[in-house]
Amino acid sequence: IIQLYTPLNWFGTYYRMIQSAFVDMESMFELLTEEKEVSASLKFCFLFFVYRKEILSEVSFTVMPGQTVALVGPSGSGKSTIIRLLFRFYDVQGGCILIDGQDISKVKQNSLRSYVGVVPQDTVLFNDNIRENIRYGRISASDQEVEEAAVAADIHHKILSFPDGYDTEVGERGLKLSGGEKQRVAIARTILKSPRIILLDEATSALDSQTERNIQASLAKVCANHTTLVVAHRLSTIIKADQILVLHDGRIAEQGRSVVCVCVCVCVCVCVCPRASVTLREKNYCKDSNDT
Ligand code: ATP
């Protein structure tokens, strides 16, 4: 027995070492397969931009990874211009925009655009079938991934109601989708693309309550854990944002999440966006139309 003790002891020690190595290896594989960081930080430093007149001046703010910032302000105050500058439709004429600390003017446009997804007000549909129109978000996506994105964007059942389903052609005389449905196609594309930063230009047109709820729900899915910059026209979007920026004449007039800031936003919305007044009335915040 004494002669057997030493080899058995050695065997036990090596067995434990090998077992612990397998456990470490398992944790290493788990770490390797863990999802990549899906959001990025954004920093706007003293933006200055002129078309023919001065459009933006001294616009500075920071968006932390995963945060949603709502841009609010009267028509022409420069909200969409901020979005266009971030997507580099135009280059800034003063100041800079940093993504994760990197100046976007020094990054290749392709690489920038793979980081950023845009859900515009008016989505362009191509003369192809609805499946390919969604797949445009990520050309390599499988049919199943396209359909999963459509489910998440809450447009799947609408597509299935067409006689040819996903194969329905979106030609000039073909598919008729409402503005809200087209925007959900754009949301499905963005879900497929899964960019780190999402730029959303909310539709100004009035939507019925059900469509608005559907769009809000699908947007919540696409924006979750992604850094989002939204040109907000709806009170519900503004209230849910982590940070609100009120623009006036190309400058930041108010910034934050304070009661004052939310009140300024409500005033701006009620003055410039008829849909917000409707929302307030629907929720009985205002007793009659005179209160708006
Ligand atoms: P809205 O809420 O109506 O969309 P906005 O706050 O998004 O307005 P921007 O679209 O950023 O405003 O426009 C800011 C200003 O820049 C406006 O005065 C507009 O007339 C001007 N502008 C926008 N695009 C151009 C252009 N391509 N050429 C010249 N001026 C432009």
Image (cartoon, grey):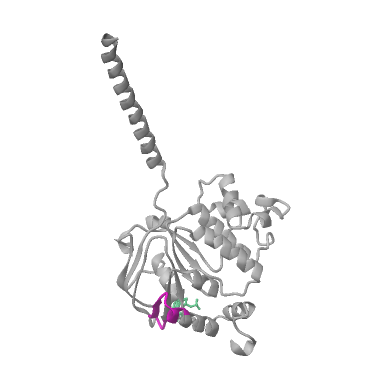
Nearer the observer, 111 or 42: 42
Relative image position of residue 179 (x, y in whole percent):
62, 67
Q: Quadrant of the N terminus?
A: top left
Relative image position of residue 19 (x, y in whole percent):
35, 27
Residue drawn 57% across and 52% down?
Answer: 149
- Residue furthest to the bottom in view is 290
State whether residue 110 is above or below residue 67. above
Residue drawn 47% across and 69% down?
Answer: 241
Relative image position of residue 225 (x, y in whole percent):
45, 58
Nearer the observer, 161 or 52: 161
Relative image position of residue 99 (x, y in whole percent):
34, 61
Nearer the observer, 122 or 160: 160
Q: Is residue 70 part of the magenta span, yes or no?
A: no
Is residue 159 left or right of 143 when viewed as pictured? right
Residue drawn 49% across and 66% down?
Answer: 200
State whether residue 1 is above or below residue 94. above
| Residue segment shown in magenta | 248-262
- Residue furthest to the front in view is 1
